[in-house]
Image (cartoon, helix red, strand yellow):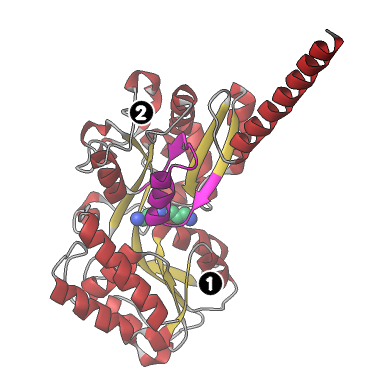
């Protein structure tokens, strides 16, 4: 009998330890649920004070992970190792995710602050009626340059980047759509072109830019520009705004041939474990004051109309970062080009990176 009790106690202890180990492993891999919310966002894309504020107000613990491209985000979500409750893809990827049934429809009754969003950013073709996504930030792609380092240069066209005087001076965003798109745009083609001959032409032309390229990087681009280690960069508008905030000699232009208008929206992936908390977080981020604080920190353009009144008026009036509809209508939004074409863009970009730096 004594032996039976001993076995029973040992059995209980072993199962307790095992349960504890499994639960810590799950936590560290992002298997959440319960009172935890796992967020997958771009790097440098939230004011961390707001995470603390949300945790304090709700008692929900946030696990926060970052990615640096839509493609990297998609790969991680498709692998399914981590159960993200929130992700922040761009428009063409949202379209792809919704077609692949990777998203949960949002409960708009739990998002009363959606009323704060400017109608211009709602009901867009990649997600009609915002069934799966709500706007987070938006922007453009353009050329950022330091006029103090390049006093004799002006930048109005993508083709200005091919100036031989810019040897080893240019930083490029590490993004397939952006860079192949830049090659296409510089030749007068669409950012959504899938014609193989045009793509090859763009690839060949990008190859001739190689001597001018200093680096192809993610968020480090800001540091390189701030430290005057490069004079020119092809960047998303918000990163340019952030750099310009620190250095008045830096300017940002949208090239005359055209460029990309993009939208990053918040979604709840199908694998989410804490859908309730995900809605609470989305509604929190849509609050006017929260969105204003986040925008001033992140420096990207907010779609939150109600937030504008709480922001620095100089920031909101800057048409380089809040271009009016007359300008944005001339820009192109990336379309979901389908699996094969997106893979082709990625392959070309990889080959360009290997061939370049
Ligand atoms: N550092 C955060 C950058 C996020 C920018 N997203 C842009 C997506 C364009 N397709």
Q: Secondary structure at mark 2?
A: helix
Q: Is residue 188 visible?
A: no
Give the vertical position of 343 relative to 48 (above or below): below
Residue 286 in the image, given as x and y percentages of width and height: 43, 32
Give the vertical position of 179 relative to 14 (above or below): below
Residue 100 in the image, given as x and y percentages of width and height: 26, 41
Of all residues, the one furthest to the bottom in this rendering is 164
Q: In the rendered structure, which disc, 2 or 1, sits on the residue that comes first in sequence?
A: 2
Q: Determine contact: label 2, label 1, CB under 8 Å.
A: no
- The residue nearer to you, when weighing 331 against 20, is 20
Give the vertical position of 134 relative to 78 (above or below): above
Residue on which disc 1 sits:
225
Marks 2 and 1, Cα distance to the nearest angstrom?
A: 36 Å
**At x 54% / y 34%, what residue is drawn?**
31
What's the magenta region? Answer: 65-89
Ligand 1 falls in which quarter? bottom left
Residue on which disc 2 sits:
114
């Amino acid at each position: 009998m004594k032996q039976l009790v001993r076995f029973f106690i040992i059995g209980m202890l072993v199962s307790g330890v095992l349960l504890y180990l499994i639960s810590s492993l799950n936590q560290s891999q992002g298997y959440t649920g319960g009172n935890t919310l796992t967020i997958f966002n771009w790097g440098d894309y939230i004011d961390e004070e707001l995470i603390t504020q949300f945790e304090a107000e709700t008692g929900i613990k946030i696990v926060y992970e970052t990615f640096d491209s839509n493609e990297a985000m998609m790969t991680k979500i498709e692998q399914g190792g981590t159960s993200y409750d929130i992700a922040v893809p761009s428009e063409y990827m949202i379209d792809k995710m919704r077609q692949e049934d990777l998203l949960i429809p949002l409960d708009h009754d739990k998002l009363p602050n959606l009323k704060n969003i400017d109608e211009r950013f709602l009901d867009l073709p990649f997600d009609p009626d915002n069934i799966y996504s709500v706007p987070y930030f938006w922007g453009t792609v353009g050329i950022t340059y330091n006029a103090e380092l390049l006093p004799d240069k002006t930048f109005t066209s993508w083709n200005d980047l091919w100036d031989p005087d810019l040897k080893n001076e240019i930083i490029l965003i590490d993004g397939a759509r952006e860079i192949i798109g830049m090659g296409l745009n510089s030749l007068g083609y669409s950012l959504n072109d899938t014609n193989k001959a045009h793509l090859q032409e763009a690839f060949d032309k990008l190859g001739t830019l190689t001597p001018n390229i200093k680096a192809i990087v993610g968020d480090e681009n800001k540091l390189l520009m701030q430290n005057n280690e490069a004079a020119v960069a092809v960047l998303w508008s918000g990163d340019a705004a952030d750099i310009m905030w620190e250095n008045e000699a830096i300017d940002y232009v949208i090239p005359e041939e055209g460029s990309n208008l993009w939208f990053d929206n918040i979604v709840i992936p199908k694998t989410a474990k804490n859908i309730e908390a995900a809605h609470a977080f989305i509604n929190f981020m849509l609050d006017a004051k929260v969105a204003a604080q986040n925008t001033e920190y992140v420096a990207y353009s907010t779609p939150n109309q109600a937030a504008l009144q709480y922001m620095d008026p100089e920031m909101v009036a800057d048409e380089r970062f809040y271009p009016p509809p007359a300008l944005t209508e001339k820009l192109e939004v990336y379309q979901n080009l389908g699996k094969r074409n997106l893979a082709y863009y990625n392959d070309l970009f990889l080959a360009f990176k290997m061939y370049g730096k």
